[in-house]
């Protein structure tokens, strides 16, 4: 604000202990004009200050609004990310449990399948053995040459035995007696073949005795040996599965 002291000239009157300033008459119009100009300047300055304060307030409110929005957005993003990570972890955990259950079921199915296969294989073996027994019995019953083949197989490898004894069933004694010379010739170095009968022996019984060895080549004995071998193999397999 411009100083009035440099614009207004007047006089000071001593009134008691105080001084009263009175402008000169010729200066009153100038002083009034200067006073009005100062008031206008002050009003302008106030308006400018109000406008500046309004702008600052608006800028502050806008900044606070943006900061609040940023905080809300960040919180929402953090909440979404946390929810996503939690959901992902839960999904992975559930998938892990599902895969473990599927694996367990697959293992059970595989065990059941192997058990079923083993059971069916054994059933097939038992059936094959039963059929073989019937076929052999039928062949022995119908074909006397089957007896000869069994005997040849029994004495194969024998040598140096002068006397050989052949034990047969009641059903085979007639055939063996009729072909005793033929049977004796099948034994290397044998000079004599004697016959013996077991009354309750099954057809196809062929037991060869010498001074050194006894050979039971009977058809039913061979089938029993095959059946025992199958049982031994089955037991060994079950033992290995139990240890595993």
Image (cartoon, grey):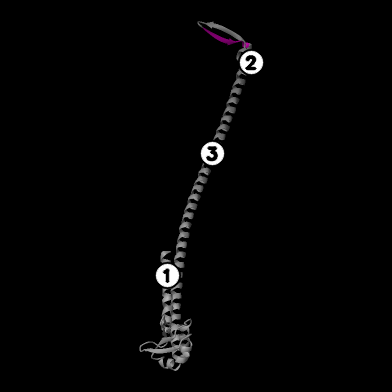
Residue at 41% x, 71% y is 235
Q: Secondary structure at mark 1?
A: helix
Of residues 52 and 243, the one nearer the viewer is 243
Tell whether position 24 is magenta.
Answer: yes
Q: Earlier in the sequence, mark 2 or mark 3?
A: 2
Work out how far the residue at label 2 is from the one at label 3, CA to CA, in angstroms. 54 Å
Instruction: Kindly identify which residue carries mark 1.
Output: 236
State which mark lies toward you, 1 or 2: 1
Instruction: Kindly identify which residue carries mark 3.
Output: 67
Question: Can residue 143 be seen from the camera position used here?
Answer: no
Residue at 46% x, 72% y is 117
Work out how far the residue at label 1 is from the one at label 2, CA to CA, in angstroms. 134 Å
State the residue lying farthest toward the left. Answer: 200
Position above or below: 176 against 66: below
Mark 2 neighbour class, 10 Å CA radius: few under 14, some 14 to 19, many 20 or more? few
Report x, y in % for residue 194: 41, 89
Instruction: Kindly identify which residue carries mark 2.
Output: 30
Of residues 73 and 159, the one nearer the viewer is 159
Q: Is residue 43 left or right of residue 123?
A: right
Magenta-drawn segment: 18-25
Q: Is residue 91 left or right of residue 11?
A: left
Mark 3 neighbour class, 10 Å CA radius: few under 14, some 14 to 19, many 20 or more? few
Question: Can residue 173 be seen from the camera position used here?
Answer: yes
Mark 1 neighbour class, 10 Å CA radius: few under 14, some 14 to 19, many 20 or more? few
């Amino acid at each position: 604000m411009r100083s009035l002291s440099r614009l207004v000239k007047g006089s000071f009157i001593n009134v008691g202990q105080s001084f009263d300033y009175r402008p000169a008459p010729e200066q009153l119009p100038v002083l009034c004009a200067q006073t009005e100009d100062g008031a206008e300047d002050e009003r302008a300055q106030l308006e400018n200050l109000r406008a500046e304060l309004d702008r600052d307030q608006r800028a502050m409110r806008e900044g606070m609004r943006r900061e609040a929005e940023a905080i809300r957005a960040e919180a929402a993003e953090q909440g979404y990310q946390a929810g996503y990570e939690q959901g992902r972890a839960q999904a992975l955990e559930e998938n892990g449990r599902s895969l473990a259950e599927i694996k367990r079921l697959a293992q059970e199915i595989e065990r059941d399948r192997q058990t079923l296969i083993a059971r069916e294989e054994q059933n097939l073996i038992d059936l094959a053995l039963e059929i073989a027994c019937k076929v052999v019995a039928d062949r022995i019953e119908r074909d006397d040459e089957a007896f000869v083949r069994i005997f040849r197989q029994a004495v194969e490898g024998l040598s140096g035995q002068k006397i050989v004894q052949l034990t047969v069933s009641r059903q085979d004694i007639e055939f063996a007696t009729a072909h005793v010379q033929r049977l004796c010739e099948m034994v290397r170095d044998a000079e004599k073949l004697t016959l013996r009968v077991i009354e309750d022996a099954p057809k196809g019984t062929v037991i060869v005795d010498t001074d050194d060895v006894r050979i039971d080549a009977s058809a039913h004995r061979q089938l029993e040996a095959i059946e025992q071998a199958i049982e031994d193999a089955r037991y060994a397999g079950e033992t290995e599965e139990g240890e595993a």
